[in-house]
Amino acid sequence: MQRISPLRTLTQYKSAYLRHDLPSGLSVFLVALPLCLGIALASGAPLFSGLVAGMVGGIVIGFLSGSEVSVSGPAAGLAVIVADAIAKIGSYEAFLVAVVLAGVIQFVLGLIKAGRFSSFFPDSVIKGMLVAIGIVIILKQIPHALGRDNDYEGEFEFQQLADGENTLSEIYRAIETASPGAVVISLISLVFLIGWDKIVGKSKRAFLKNFPAPLIVVCGGVALNEFYRVAVPGWYLGDTAHQHMVQIPTIKPGQSLFSIFDFPDFSILANPQVYGIAATIALVASLETLLNLEASDRLDPAKRISSPDQELIAQGVGNMLSGLIGGLPVTSVVVRTSANVYGGAKTRISTILHGSFLLIAVFLGGALLNLIPLSCLAAVLITVGYKLAKPAIFQKVYRDGWSQFVPFIVTVVGIIFTDLLIGIALGSVVGILFVLYTNVQTSFRVDRDGRKVTIEFEKDLYFLSKPQLKEVLGTLQSGDEVIIDGANAPFIDHDIYNMLQDYSEIAKVQGIGYELRNVVLNRRKRQRTSSLVPQ
């Protein structure tokens, strides 16, 4: 596997890339900002902890990552685990110790090359995951586009924790309570983003192609909402019961910089619970990271192959640092990665820039960024979701055959109506079943020429082929001359071998000519054994 070295990337960096990476980093920053805050809120953690995780994911993991386009930060898939862990262990400071330990575990997993397990996920499941995430992004952002913000930004589960609704019922409630001001902002933003893509596609001016459309949308959303304040107060979004705005925690005058950070309470190391929580976080975070890394390689226009082991090491370092300075657990995340790729990123510099923008926003620009309506950011995310779930993708996978389409669609439906990990598990199980079924169907072939029947094994035969082979033997008739040729099967399972031997007695009684050629029990093992015998 080709290994991407971050140092090599940075030393060979060309200034020409910056015109792609800078606008992309800015676009990812605008998408990541509400997601970091929303996931922290859902986790029952301080809001600042989500921003800390976003900074670490962008700057530190971005530098060390095994991928040029993957973006890391706090993940919605860990929100329930984090909330439950904080409740069990008693305090957020104690929970941070588990985050540090989880980072240590991930670092070790990277050193022992555990990243190779990412290759076991079927290709159809990875495609299904990307499409499902695109659909979920659209469904989850529709309420925010309509001005309903009861559910936090970044949640992916069908059953919503924040308000007891589910994805579909939340959309219905949002339509019932739609805010005219939010609807106008989101519609204008969507029309602009769609029109901008078409204009840029036809334009020959490089400036237009590299200018971040999300920035224009955000500035327009802020300006329009401020216009509401003066001209249409009833549409103004800053005075609603659930404020429809980005809400960054700001440092108050006279407040120490370090007072907004939380630090781990290492006295909790005497509590055995912390180690179980750390292991859970490490395993779930690693699984999500490896899945998302596979997805990011698929999205990468340059088709670079990332090192999963290097990514695990980077995630380990990132989580150790995030835990030490009060941040949530960090994983590679598809939503921000997708925004990065579709924003035109060329290298990891865009990821590092997005983390740097989060850092600047917290310490210098919080008051200004709190003027951004969530409806314009919802429009940006909806366009990202559509690019992930274009109808043409369904058509392409369908043309690949049922063995690809069924696991793909099961993954899509599973993620939409449960959550990411359950959907992936369902799709993987179905994919494995199709592999087994296909293997059984193609393990041997039958040729009949009058009374002459040849059953030729084409590959290794396992017990899964027994029912089909038994059915074929059951169709033989008196007078048939049957040859079973196992020359192409280095391995024949005990069950298959015994059944073929036993059938010779049945053949005699029924008057069937029956011959076994090259049918040897586990020939591969015999060959290895004989090669060890001194000549």
Image: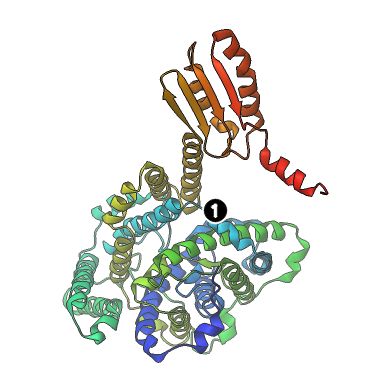
Q: Nearer the viewer, residue 531 or 9?
A: 531
Instruction: For residue 43, say whether it is visible.
Output: yes
Instruction: For residue 86, say whether it is visible.
Output: no
The quadrant where residue 315 appears: bottom right
Secondary structure beneath dot 1 equals helix
Label 1, residues with CA under 10 Å away: few <14, some 14-19, many ≥20: few
Q: Is residue 16 above or below residue 174?
A: below
| x then y, percent, for residue 31 | 38, 72
Q: Nearer the viewer, residue 413 or 148?
A: 413
| x then y, percent, for residue 70 | 47, 71
State the residue at coordinates (35%, 44%).
401
Q: Residue furthest front?
A: 535
The residue tagged 1 is 120
Q: Is residue 192 above or below residue 497?
A: below
| Amino acid at pointer 1 | Phe
Left or right of 34 in this view: 208: left
State the residue at coordinates (38%, 87%).
18
State the residue at coordinates (26%, 61%).
146
| x then y, percent, for residue 213 | 27, 78
The quadrant where residue 505 appears: top right
Q: How is the image coloured?
A: rainbow
Q: Residue furthest right?
A: 534
| x then y, percent, for residue 225 | 24, 76
Q: Nearer the viewer, residue 472 or 464?
A: 472
Q: Is residue 441 above or below residue 242?
A: above
Left or right of 7 in this view: 475: left
Left or right of 522 in this view: 203: left
